Image (cartoon, rainbow, N blue to C red):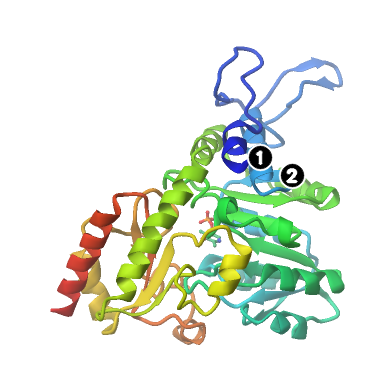
């Protein structure tokens, strides 16, 4: 089965009791036992629920893993991936990561005795150079948020294998439609399913997928023990979104490519970054390891905060909001929003300036998107 078919069929057999074509929302906390010591397929919805199970199977298939686990948020999924570590263990992470992941690393994991070293993710050798005796995990996000640097997954996976270190990859920005890190040597893939997977900005969720049975067992133990699970309705919404992932991603990318080319030709913006532009320093790697370039575009407005304010006010179709990956186009200001938790110095160090703008290109008519940007940029320049 190919991707678009898997998205619609895997885990989604017609309901055995009614023949319902869609997996029902099994909105129940518990399930009766057939007899003493004889549970049915499900017992209690923290441990497992049929709607969640259908969604988890589909996620695993799309990432070409064997096991999917759904969580109540992307952050809960990141936390679950870290649960395999012990005090004293060390993580080598690329420095360009989601702001909330950085906060979890520094504000929670560090307090539990996990040590971190951040390296330039574009340099595979940098990961190797930072490995210590107790390094147990390498963490990557590619393309990275918000400056869209890529990590060479195969190169870093080779290093991880050599040192027997787990490679964890946050695949939120690409979605499994454009990139499947497990097939390139990653051990575990993490998602904020809030983004492209659910795709409609109407649910918060996360997922962890792996092909390794032993790793899955530990992660599933943590999922059930800590209980940061999504409810049946959230799973159903996410599964409903997931069905159209293939068509959405194609349209997201088509629009993003057109917007990126248009932006790159404007004199009123600087430094347009999009992995699908030949000007991206890792364009060749993007073509090699991804099946598509995604739909996040970053650029700088000369003129700092004032210019950002005028630009945001000038937009009608683009919504000024956190998040990404929904059908609607969004504009985000990483300095004050997604990376607001980082100090100005830390932000500057990784290349985020006051004028940095991140666009999440939706699936509206691209002519309307470009016209909206054109109008806002005119107003910014006034
Ligand atoms: C949004 C996001 C997260 C966190 O996910 P939530 O669903 O908001 O908890 C993690 N990683 C990346 C790359 C994200 O974009």
Residue closest to the far top: 18
Which residue is depicted at the point 62% across and 28% down? 12
Helix, strand or loop under label 1 = helix
Q: Quadrant of the N terminus?
A: top right
Viewer-proximal residue among 143 and 275 = 275
Report the residue marked by disc 1: 56
Q: Quadrant of the C terminus?
A: bottom left
Q: Quadrant of residue 272?
A: bottom left
* Residue 243 to residue 159: above or below: above
Q: Position of residue 271 (x, y in %)?
A: 38, 81
Report the residue marked by disc 2: 67
CB-based contact (under 8 Å), mark 2 and mark 1: yes
* Residue 303 to residue 24: above or below: below
310 left or right of 54 in image: left
Q: Residues within 10 Å of mark 1 (few under 14, many from 20)?
A: many
Which residue is depicted at the point 41% across and 50% down? 251
Q: Which mark is residue 330?
A: none
Q: Residues within 10 Å of mark 2 (few under 14, many from 20)?
A: many
* Residue at mark 2 to residue at mark 1: CA–CA distance: 7 Å
250 left or right of 42 in image: left
Which residue is depicted at the point 62% across and 47% down? 71
Helix, strand or loop under label 2 = strand
Q: Tally the numbered discs.
A: 2
Cβ of mark 2 under 8 A from ligand 1: no
Viewer-proximal residue among 364 and 353 = 364
Q: Position of residue 47 (x, y in %)?
A: 72, 36
Upstream in sequence: badge 2 or badge 1 = 1
């Amino acid at each position: 089965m190919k991707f678009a078919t898997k998205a619609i069929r895997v885990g989604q057999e017609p309901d055995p009791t009614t023949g319902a074509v869609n997996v029902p929302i099994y909105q129940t906390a518990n399930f009766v036992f057939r007899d003493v010591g004889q549970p049915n397929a499900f017992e209690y919805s923290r441990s497992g629920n049929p709607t969640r199970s259908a969604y988890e199977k589909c996620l695993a298939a799309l990432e070409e893993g064997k096991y999917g686990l759904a969580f109540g948020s992307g952050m809960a999924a990141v936390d679950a991936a870290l649960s395999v570590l012990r005090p004293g263990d060390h993580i080598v992470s690329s420095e360009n990561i989601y702001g909330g992941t950085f906060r979890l690393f520094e504000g929670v994991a560090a307090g539990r005795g996990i040590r971190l070293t951040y390296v330039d993710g574009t340099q595979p050798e940098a990961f190797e150079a930072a490995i210590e005796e107790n390094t147990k995990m390498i963490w990557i996000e590619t393309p990275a948020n918000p400056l869209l640097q890529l990590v060479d997954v195969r190169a870093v996976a080779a290093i991880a294998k050599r040192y027997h270190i787990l490679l964890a990859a946050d695949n939120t920005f690409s979605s499994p439609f454009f990139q499947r890190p497990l097939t390139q040597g990653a051990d575990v893939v993490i998602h904020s399913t809030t983004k492209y997977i659910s795709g409609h900005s109407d649910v918060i969720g996360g997922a962890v997928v792996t092909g390794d049975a032993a790793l899955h067992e530990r992660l599933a133990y943590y999922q059930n023990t800590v209980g940061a699970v999504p409810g049946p309705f959230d799973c159903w919404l996410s599964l409903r979104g997931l069905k159209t992932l293939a068509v959405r991603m194609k349209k997201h990318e088509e629009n993003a490519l057109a917007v990126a080319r248009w932006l790159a030709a404007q004199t009123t913006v600087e430094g347009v970054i999009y992995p699908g532009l030949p000007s991206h320093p890792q364009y060749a790697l993007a073509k090699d390891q991804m099946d598509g370039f995604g739909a996040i575009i970053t650029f700088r407005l000369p003129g700092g905060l004032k210019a950002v304010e005028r630009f945001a006010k000038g937009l009608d179709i683009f919504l000024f909001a956190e998040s990404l990956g929904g059908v609607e186009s969004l504009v985000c200001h990483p300095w004050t929003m997604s990376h607001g938790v980082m100090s100005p110095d830390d932000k500057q160090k990784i290349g985020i300036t006051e004028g940095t703008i991140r666009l999440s290109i939706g699936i509206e008519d691209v002519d309307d998107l470009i016209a909206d940007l054109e109008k806002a940029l005119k107003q910014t320049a006034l």
